[in-house]
Amino acid sequence: MSYICKNLLIRCMDFRLNKKMRGWIAESNLFNGGFDVISLAGASKDIVDGSEEIKNNFLKHIGVSVDLHQVEKIIIFHHSDCGAYAQDYQFGSLKEEKGKQLEDMKKAKEIILEKYPEVEVVFVWGELIDEDGKEIEFEIL
């Protein structure tokens, strides 16, 4: 039997996102047709910053979703106050942090489309209004 879903979500593993993200996903039209999930610290950060081995492993997991489940759309979700980014960068402002993460999302998109040109790639930003993640503003970029 073949299992098909239309979408793949690449998201940060940060536990603070879970509750609000589940609600946003349920309300969003982005995930119609179901979705697979890749959850790593910094979301797509490692596909841009990681070693060749890490990048290839990341692409392998994307390939499983695309090839096995016939995914058509990849949603890359990054968020403010990300610990994976804080380990490597000292941002002076939220604008600077968002700018760097958006730059990385664009690089990740290029890398993904080189290998899987048939998919659509969408960016989503989550801005934590409080440090606990009780309030998050979601924005499709």
Image: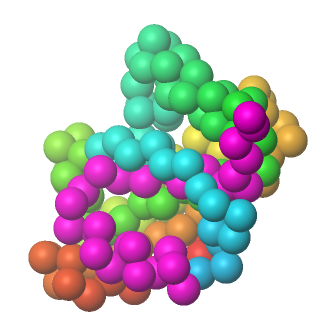
Count of numbered circles on the image: 0
- The residue positioned 14% from the left and 76% from the top of the image is 131
- The residue positioned 30% from the left and 44% from the top of the image is 41
In the drawing, does residue 131 fall left or right of residue 115?
Answer: left
Q: Which span of residues is magenta-colored? A: 1-27
In the image, 13 versus 127, the foreground residue is 13
The residue lying furthest to the top in this view is 53
The question of residue 22 being in magenta is answered with yes
The residue lying furthest to the left in this view is 132
Q: Is residue 116 above or below residue 126?
A: above
The question of residue 87 being in magenta is answered with no
The residue lying furthest to the right in this view is 118
Res. 113 visible in picture: no
| Residue 64, percent from left and from top | 63, 29
In the image, 68 versus 124, the foreground residue is 68
In the drawing, does residue 66 fall left or right of residue 12?
Answer: right
In the image, 77 versus 103, the foreground residue is 77
The residue lying furthest to the front in this view is 1
Res. 31 visible in picture: yes
- The residue positioned 50% from the left and 75% from the top of the image is 25
Quadrant into which the N terminus falls:
top right
